[in-house]
Each structure stands twice: as C-alpha cells, then as structure tokens.
C-alpha cells in the first residue's frame, strides 16, 4: 500500500508539473525548468552522503570503537540480504540516526552519540533495521525524484512571478485567460507540490518502519525506540538543517501545530500504533 501511495503521489507531482509548465512557459519552458532542477538534485544525490555526514561532523567508526553496534548491523544485513554499509558516529547529544548514500553498495548508517547513550540493544536493532530498509528500498532515489519535480514546479512559478513583475505573461494569459489563473498557479501549485513531496517522505517513513520491524524480527524494539527518541529530541534539540531533516528517523526540528502540517515525518504516536498492530 505504501508503494502504491508513493507512486500515486509521484504521478500527482508530475501532473502538476506538466500543467504548471504548460501554463506559464509552454513545453519548452517546462523542459528547461525540469532539466535544471534535475541537474541540481542529481549532483546533490550523488554527493549527498559526503555532504550530510560533513554537516553533522560525523566520523567513520570501526568495529573496535563500537563493537555492539557493528554486531547489530552485521546480524541485520544478513536478514536484509544486503551489503555492509559504512558506519558513522555523529557527536551530537540529540538521540537520532539516519542513512544516506546513492545505493546499497554506496551507503552509510550514521547514529548520534546520544542515541547510543539511551537505547538498549533491542531498541537500537529496531532503529538500525529502519535505516537499512531505507537503503534497501532506495528511498534516497525516490526522494531525489520527488525533489526534482517539486523543484521544477517551484522554479517555473518563480520565473513566472518575475515575468509578471516586469510585465511578462504566461502562455495561457497570452491566449486571453485572466490573471486569476496565474495567481492560482503562482501560489497554489508550489504549495501543493511541497505538500505532496512531504507526503511522499511520510509514506517512505511508514514503509521503513514496517520493513525495518520485519528485518529486526520485533516491531516493539522500534516502537519503544521512537518514543524515547521523541522525548530525547525535546530535551536535546538538534541544530539541524531543514533540507536534511527528512533523513533522520525522527524529525530533529522543533515543531508546533502549524509545523506539523509541513513535517517530513508522520506523528510518532501513529507510527507506534502501526508497529504495535504488527504483533500477532
């Protein structure tokens, strides 16, 4: 179901892109915006592992430094039938974790020092299994595709905004349509694209929870870990970058009621509820 939902959301993004591109710039304008956004996101995708690890001061660790963590990962990759990722430790006290890399053969799992301090072995297994499922499912690629399309939509809208300021008009307006259509496209389309992109991110989190619980063999370890991580992130908030928030197993950013609408992560309580429902 999560894969179907992700596919439908990607199709919706594509439809918005085609409509917006045709409205403002015709076929040529849409193609230019898509190519530019694609190049930007592919560069980010190709080097994302190095960039994000550097941003959080993560250092590669070997088995002698974190033997228990290595043993957990080695056991889980057998269950997941995937290669061993590189292992990194970030020095933050905030308990959190993320996976990055463009493919299972070029992947890294990073945990913060804070998460090692508060989770027991079974909870840590659940967290690592969740991150391995992101790698196995190539969620980095899925999110790059979503970011490319959403970025292209926003780019076309920005071009149209500047064109309107300097007296230019979209392709539809030149055909006699009212400026109301342009206003709707300038405001509604980018917001809709962003919300769909966030929905894709949340869908991939649910899928990673489910598959991660199966890899670990126990959904309760991950559900307990999520509750601890939610509490720990409130006590030790992370100075995280908005553009990398979707990578973490729990949202590292401070949240209020309005921010929850634009969150890259589903509510912890709902994630826990779904995990507990897996118990037979």
Image: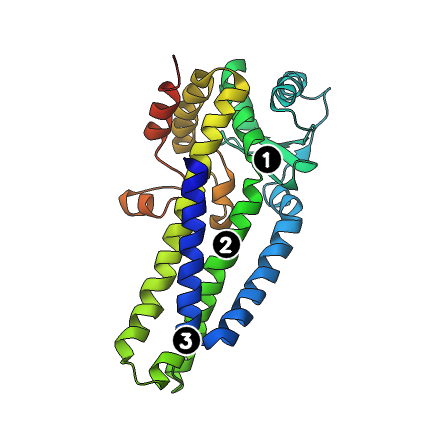
Mark 3: few, some, or many residues within 10 Å (few <14, many ≥20)? many
Does residue 70 appear left or right of residue 137 in this picture?
A: right
Kindly report the distance in space between the C-alpha atoms of the residues bearing marks 2 and 1: 18 Å
Tell me residue 97's x, y (percent): 53, 32
**Location of residue 163 (image quadrant):** bottom left
Depicted 271 relative to depicted 251: above or below: above
Q: Give the structural element (helix, strand or loop) at label 1.
A: helix
Tell me residue 45's x, y (percent): 61, 50
Kindly report the distance in space between the C-alpha atoms of the residues bearing marks 1 and 3: 37 Å
Say which label, 3 or 2, has the lower sequence index: 3
Q: Are marks 3 and 2 in contact (CB under 8 Å)?
A: no
Instruction: Pick whichever, 52 or 48, lies toward us.
Output: 48
Mark 1: few, some, or many residues within 10 Å (few <14, many ≥20)? many
Q: Give the structural element (helix, strand or loop) at label 2.
A: helix
Kindly report the distance in space between the C-alpha atoms of the residues bearing marks 3 and 2: 20 Å
Q: Quadrant of the N terminus?
A: top left
Q: Quadrant of the C terminus?
A: top left
Q: Quickly name the residue at label 1.
A: 135
Does residue 189 appear left or right of residue 112 in this picture?
A: left
Does residue 234 appear left or right of residue 97 in this picture?
A: left
Q: Quickly name the residue at label 3.
A: 24
């Amino acid at each position: 179901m999560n894969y179907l939902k992700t596919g439908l959301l990607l199709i919706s993004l594509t439809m918005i892109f085609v409509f917006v591109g045709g409205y403002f710039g015709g076929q040529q304008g849409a193609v230019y915006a898509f190519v530019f956004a694609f190049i930007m996101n592919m560069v980010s995708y190709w080097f994302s592992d190095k960039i994000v690890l550097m941003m959080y001061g993560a250092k590669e660790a070997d088995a002698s430094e974190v033997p228990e963590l290595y043993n957990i990962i080695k056991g889980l990759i057998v269950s997941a039938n995937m290669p061993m990722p590189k292992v990194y430790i970030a020095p933050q006290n905030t308990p959190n974790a993320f996976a990055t890399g463009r493919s299972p053969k070029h992947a890294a799992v990073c945990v913060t020092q804070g998460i090692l301090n508060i989770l027991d072995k079974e909870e840590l297994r659940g967290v690592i299994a969740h991150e391995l499922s992101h790698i196995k499912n190539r969620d980095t690629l899925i999110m790059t595709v979503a970011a490319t399309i959403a970025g292209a939509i926003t780019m076309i809208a920005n071009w149209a905004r500047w064109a309107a300021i300097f007296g230019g008009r979209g392709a539809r307006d030149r055909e006699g349509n009212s400026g109301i259509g342009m206003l709707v496209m300038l405001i509604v389309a980018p917001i809709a694209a962003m919300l769909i992109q966030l929905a894709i991110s949340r869908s991939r989190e649910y899928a990673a929870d489910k598959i991660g619980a199966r890899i670990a063999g126990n959904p309760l370890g991950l559900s307990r870990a999520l509750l601890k991580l939610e509490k720990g992130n409130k006590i030790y908030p992370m100075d995280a970058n908005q553009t990398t928030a979707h990578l973490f197993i729990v949202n590292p950013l401070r949240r209020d009621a309005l921010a929850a609408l634009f969150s890259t992560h589903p509510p912890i309580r709902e994630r826990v509820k779904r995990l507990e429902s897996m118990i037979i």
